[in-house]
Amino acid sequence: MEDTTTLSVTKPIRCIVKLGGAAITCKNDLEKINEENVEIVSSQLREAMITGSSSRKVLGMDWSKRPGKSGISCDADDFEDQNLDSSSFVVVHGAGSFGHFQASKSGVHKGGLNKPLVKAGFVATRISVTTLNLEIVRALAREGIPSIGMSPFSCGWTTSERNMASADLSMVAQAINSGFVPVLHGDAVLDDLQGCTILSGDVIIRHLAAYLKPEYVVFLTDVLGVYDRPPSEPNAVLLREIAVSEDGSWSVVKPTLEDMKKQVETTVAAHDTTGGMATKISEAALIAKLGIDVYIVKAATTHSSRALSGEVKGTLPEDWLGTVIRFVGKGNRNC
């Protein structure tokens, strides 16, 4: 894969956060944001970024007019006391009920830009996902997080037969070095062989993790973590710790269950063009192979707050509910 990055990040990255589409949108309701979850997650991210004796007063950065608001409030003097460790975080979000329907209906993920329906669907998909990206950026900005939306398509990311071919990370690096929080998203991109496809947020996170080498990665989802079967089924068991070996295979460490299958049963919504939970697990395993712990946890809960802050690093607290995926190669101190 060609990587045209020319600028290095000048400070360590604490965490890359994936906001799952099912957690931030109402996935079965076309283009509807789960505003409560987005608001809570944005607040939790801000809390995780606060350093030292920084003021806990929220100084919003979304100075646009909003429905139901009479005016725009901004006091320049208030910003002198802000001290968020914002440049050590990167956010990536999925599409949920934005983009997937348009991509599925037109077949964008299968390619064929020479077909009028696919070309129209490509445009419609990007309108939808960039609309969601703006709303996520605004939600973070209202919490005083200096967030900047970045689209893979606009940054020149491309694929070849649906595999990453080129990813220019120079603007991401420059944004981080300038103290901003890049907010990327799953996107419709050009493909060298099939014309176009969908690049999922989970694949984007894996690429970012390989380049930025964060301390840990957090996937925020609409369920507590990874289960041995769809969580809606009776007797579904939450897998608290999964170990990834050097050859990429993985096994369940906690809980210890007889006849536990390595391959977890997953379900994918009919309109989901990115692979759903199956893609999430495989991409998380690839990140773990880099020596980076990956936490999969339900968004907008005390468990997600603890994961974002780094509180659950190392030995998992017994009262924390979620899944950690870790590398078990030689010298790994966490296992």
Image (tube, rainbow, N blue to C red):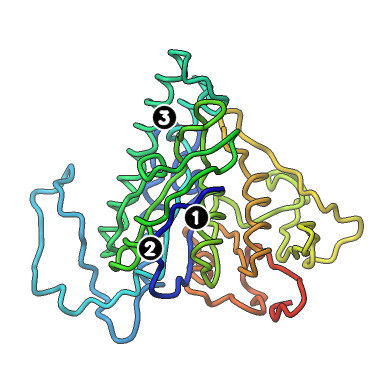
Label 1 belongs to which residue? 18
Q: Quarter of the image holding residue 5?
A: bottom left
Give the residue number, with chain letter if any, for mark 2. Answer: 7
Residue appearing at x 68%, y 57% in the figure: 285
Which comes sooner in the sequence, label 1 or label 3? 1
* Relative to 78, residue 242 above or below: above
Q: Marks 1/3: CA distance? A: 20 Å
Q: Is 72 or 291 nearer to us in this picture?
A: 291
Q: Which SS class for mark 3?
A: helix
Image quadrant holding the C terminus, namely: bottom right
The residue located at (15%, 49%) in the rendering is 64
- Which sits in the foreground, 315 or 5? 5
Q: Nearer the viewer, residue 134 or 67?
A: 134
Decide: few, some or many residues near mark 3? Use Cα within 10 Å; few <14, some 14-19, many ≥20.
many
Against 194, is 151 above or below?
below
Q: Considering only order in the chain, which callout, 2 or 1, is on the residue closer to the N terminus?
A: 2
Q: Which amino acid does the dot numbered 2 rest on? A: Leu
Which numbered circle lies on residue 93?
none
Provide residue 247's location: percent of width, then percent of height. 79, 59
Answer with left or right where residue 252 lies relative to residue 40: right
Residue closer to the observer: 92 or 24:
92
Q: Which residue is at 67% across, 52% downward?
A: 281
Mark number, residue 125: 3
Amino acid under disc 1? Lys
* Amino acid carrying mark 3 in the image: Thr
Q: CA distance from mark 3 to mark 2?
A: 30 Å
Q: Report whether residue 93 is seen.
A: yes
* Residue 240: % across, % down: 71, 65
Query: In the shown orientation, is residue 233 left or right of residue 142?
Result: right
